[in-house]
Amino acid sequence: MERRYEIINSGECLMAKQTRDDRVLRDDRVLAFLKSHDTINFFEGLYQCGTSRLPAAIWNLRHKRKLNIHKEMRPHTNQFGDTERIAYYKLIN
C-alpha cells in the first residue's frame, strides 16, 4: 500500500497530512518538523508535534523509513538550576 502525503502549513510548523484518511500520523508530524527546522528535542516534540514519545517516532523514522537521523546530547539548565542533558535530533541529508 502506497502512502500519499500532502504538506500543509499549520502556523508554527509544516504538517504532513496523510491523504488516505486525512489523519496526520505522529511520525509524519515529527518528520515535517525536522524538515522545516534544524533540530527537534523532547519539548518541541511535545508542544509542536503533540507527542511525548519522540524517541519512538525517531526510531520508526530511522528503521522503517531508513532516514539518517543524528542524536546529540546537549546540556540544559532546568528551572531549579540543575544541569541536565537533553537529546536533540537532526535529519542528515
Image (cartoon, helix red, strand yellow):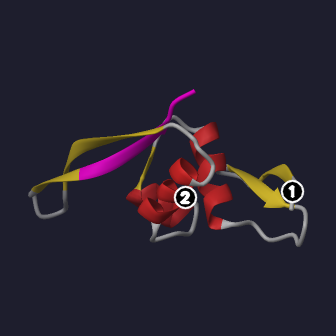
Label 2 Cα crowd, 10 Å radius (few <14 / some 14-19 / many 20+): some
Residue ID at (51%, 30%): 92
Tell me the amino acid under the disc marked 2.
Asn
Q: Which residue is situated farthest in the right direction here?
A: 20
| Apparent side of residue 78 relative to residue 87 in the rendered image (left or right) | left
Quadrant of the image occupied by residue 26: bottom right
Coordinates of residue 4 in the picture (x, y in percent): 87, 54
Who's the residue at 82% across and 51% down the image?
A: 8
Q: Position of residue 89 (x, y in %)?
A: 42, 44
Residue 33 versus residue 80: which sits nearer the camera? 33
Span colored in magenta: 86-93
Kindly indicate the quadrant of the structure image that contains residue 28: bottom right
Distance of mark 2 from mark 1, alpha carbons? 17 Å
Residue that label 1 marks: 2
Question: Which residue reaches farthest left?
Answer: 82
User: Is residue 6 part of the magenta span, yes or no?
Assistant: no
Locate the C terminus and report the quarter of the image it occupies. top right
Confirm or deny contact between disc 2 and disc 1 (CB under 8 A): no
Q: Quadrant of the N terminus?
A: bottom right
Q: Which residue is rendered at x = 62% and y = 60% of the image? A: 27
Q: Is residue 89 magenta?
A: yes
* Res 75 → quadrant: top left
**Label 1 SS:** loop
Rendered location of residue 44, percent (x, y): 47, 56
Which residue, given by chain and number where applicable, does mark 2 sit on? 60
Q: Is residue 4 left or right of residue 50?
A: right
Residue 78: x and y in percent read 19, 59
Q: Secondary structure at mark 2?
A: helix
